[in-house]
Image (tube, rainbow, N blue to C red):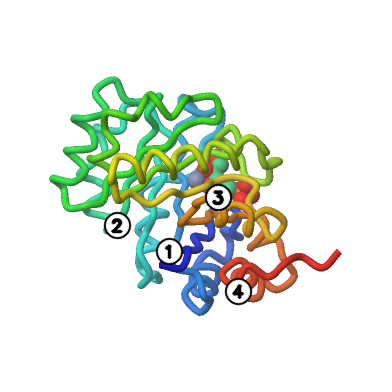
Amino acid sequence: MSHLIAPSLLAADFGNLARDVQMVEGSEADWHHIDVMDGMFVPNISYGMPVIAAIGQHAEKPLDVHLMIEAPDRYIGHFAALGAHTLTVHAEACVHLHRTLGAIREAGMRPGVALNPHTPISTIEEVLGDVDLVCLMSVNPGFGGQKFIEATFNKVERLAALRQSAGAQFLIEVDGGVGQKNAGQLVAAGADVLVAGSSVFKAPDPVTAVSNLKHLRQEVA
Ligand code: DX5
Ligand code: ZN
């Protein structure tokens, strides 16, 4: 399987949201990445249900929803109703992670689990058979446009090795500071889904930026 590209709408122009969603639709991107922040789990508030409903009106491609919120169980039904395809919760935000992942699947979505840069892979070893996606944060979550943490390459390699030895099937997603500079090395390490906010939406030509990530074209210095 070729890797997937999920542009993060956090970096979109919210005054022209429909236009930016349509740009993603018309590009080689595979998913829309949707970042929900509550100002508690992370020190920032992004957007919520009405904005996601508006995105959904213009989106045909799957909605990859990344919840950076405390106690996400409260909203599983809401995100199912909004048409989320994958619903990713943070391991650090879930006291009963196994139950939460089961509830997401029960609600008809694909369960994903995200790990902050400091969180060891071993914390989710017992649920690797229960998830469709593991998101490795390559920045501390909360903001777009941050610098990629280089230790992520090794973390992706270790997770890919664990997936193989466990015979598990989940996708490995990398989120934060991803662009043409590191995309090739991430895919080589075992990443299946690349989330890219700034490197797509702040590019002079976002459609070409997506294409470059999809085909792993190297940046010309
Ligand atoms: C960070 C978010 C990311 C972010 C990525 O908390 O989860 O999805 O939007 O943005 P860039 O690609 O600009 O780092
Ligand atoms: Zn994200």
Secondary-structure class at tag 2: loop
In three-dimensional space, the C-alpha distance between marks 3 and 2, rounded to whole angstroms, equals: 25 Å
Could you say which quadrant of the image residue 219 lies in? bottom right
Looking at the picture, which amino acid does disc 4 mark? Ser
Please tell me in which quadrant of the rendered image residue 54 appears: bottom left
Which circle's residue, 4 or 3, is located before the other in the chain? 3
Residue designated by label 1: 31
Q: Amino acid at mark 2?
A: His
Q: Is residue 214 above or below residue 8?
A: below
| For marks 1 and 3 on the same chain, the one whose residue lies earlier in the sequence | 1
Question: Reading the chain from its start, which is encountered first: label 2 or label 1?
Answer: 1
In the picture, measured across the screen, residue 220 lies left or right of residue 51, that is right
Earlier along the polypeptide chain: callout 2 or callout 4?
A: 2
The residue closer to the viewer here, 49 or 6, is: 6
The x, y position of residue 56, in whole percent, is 36, 64
The local secondary structure at tag 1 comes to loop
Q: Cβ–Cβ below 8 Å for labels 2 and 1?
A: yes
Q: Are marks 2 and 4 in contact (CB under 8 Å)?
A: no
Q: Residue at x 65, y 47 (%)?
A: 177
Q: Which mark is residue 85?
A: 2
> Residue, x 35% and y 72% (percent of image)?
60
Q: Position of residue 122 (x, y in %)?
A: 39, 25
* Relative depth, front residue between 106 and 191: 191
Label 4 vs label 1: CA separation?
13 Å
The residue identified by callout 4 is: 211
Amino acid on which disc 3 is placed: Ala
Q: At label 1, which amino acid type do we have?
A: Trp
Q: Nearer the viewer, mark 4 or mark 1?
A: 4
